[in-house]
Image (cartoon, rainbow, N blue to C red):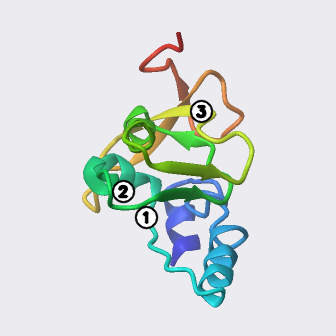
């Protein structure tokens, strides 16, 4: 059904996978075998639920896979976690490298498609950033 959705909506075959079967899924299986308690959230959860990482909730936010595209709200949530004394570890390159903005909400949810900033080679359309680096 995922492939059918991608075809119907003229999306890249890579849309929506974000490396989950290559990086996150094997890491979670390994961590659980080692006895670690693991809770999982998506980047979208970081934007929709900024209180998800409230102080004292989690000691560590761990980003395992290719985690390149973030909205400013996603990054704000993680930065607030760190500023409040939480820890974060990013086990890949280009983390939070491209700022994205969500557009075109769908009946299935508020996300719709997203736009990357600054001329990404992504198959999605690129637009001007919503914030500038200082």
Considering only vertical position in the picture, is 8 above or below 127?
below
- Is label 3 in a helix, a strand or a loop? strand
In the rendered structure, are the residues bearing label 3 and label 2 in contact, judged by CB atoms less than 8 Å apart? no
Give the label, 1 or 3, closer to the camera. Answer: 1
Among the 4 quarters of the image, the one containing residue 80: top left
Question: What label does residue 41 carry, if any?
Answer: 1
Say few, some or many: other residues with alpha carbon within 10 Å of mark 1 (under 14 / 14 to 19 / 20 or more): few
Q: Earlier in the sequence, mark 3 or mark 2?
A: 2
Looking at the image, residue 97 lies above or below residue 16: above
Residue 56 in the image, given as x and y percentages of width and height: 32, 57
Residue 58 horizontal/vertical position (percent): 40, 61
On the rendered structure, is 77 left or right of 115? left
In-image side of 120 versus 43 (left or right): right
With respect to residue 100, does 132 lie above or below?
above
Q: Which residue is mark 2?
A: 45
Residue 106 appears in the picture as rendered: no
Q: Is residue 106 left or right of residue 40?
A: left
Identify the mark nearer the N-term, 1 or 3: 1
Label 1, label 2: how far apart the Cα atoms are: 6 Å
Residue 118: image x %, image y %?
62, 21
**3D distance between C-alphas at marks 3 and 2:** 18 Å
Query: Furthest residue to the top?
Result: 134
SS at mark 1 in the image:
loop
Residue bearing mark 3: 98
State yes or no: discs 1 and 2 in contact (Cβ < 8 Å). yes
Q: Which residue is drawn at the image coordinates 53% and 14% (left, top)? A: 133
């Amino acid at each position: 059904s995922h492939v059918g959705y991608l075809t119907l909506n003229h999306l890249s075959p890579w849309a929506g996978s974000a490396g989950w079967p290559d990086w996150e899924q094997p890491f979670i299986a390994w961590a659980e075998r080692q006895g670690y308690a693991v809770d999982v959230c998506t980047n979208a959860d970081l934007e929709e639920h900024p209180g998800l990482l409230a102080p004292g909730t989690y000691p560590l936010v761990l980003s395992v896979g290719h985690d390149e595209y973030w909205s400013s709200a996603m990054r704000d949530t993680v930065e607030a976690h760190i500023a409040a004394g939480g820890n974060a570890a990013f086990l890949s390159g280009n983390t939070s490298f491209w700022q994205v903005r969500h557009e075109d909400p769908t009946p299935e949810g508020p996300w719709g498609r997203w736009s990357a900033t600054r001329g990404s080679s992504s198959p999605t359309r690129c637009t001007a950033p919503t914030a500038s680096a200082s």
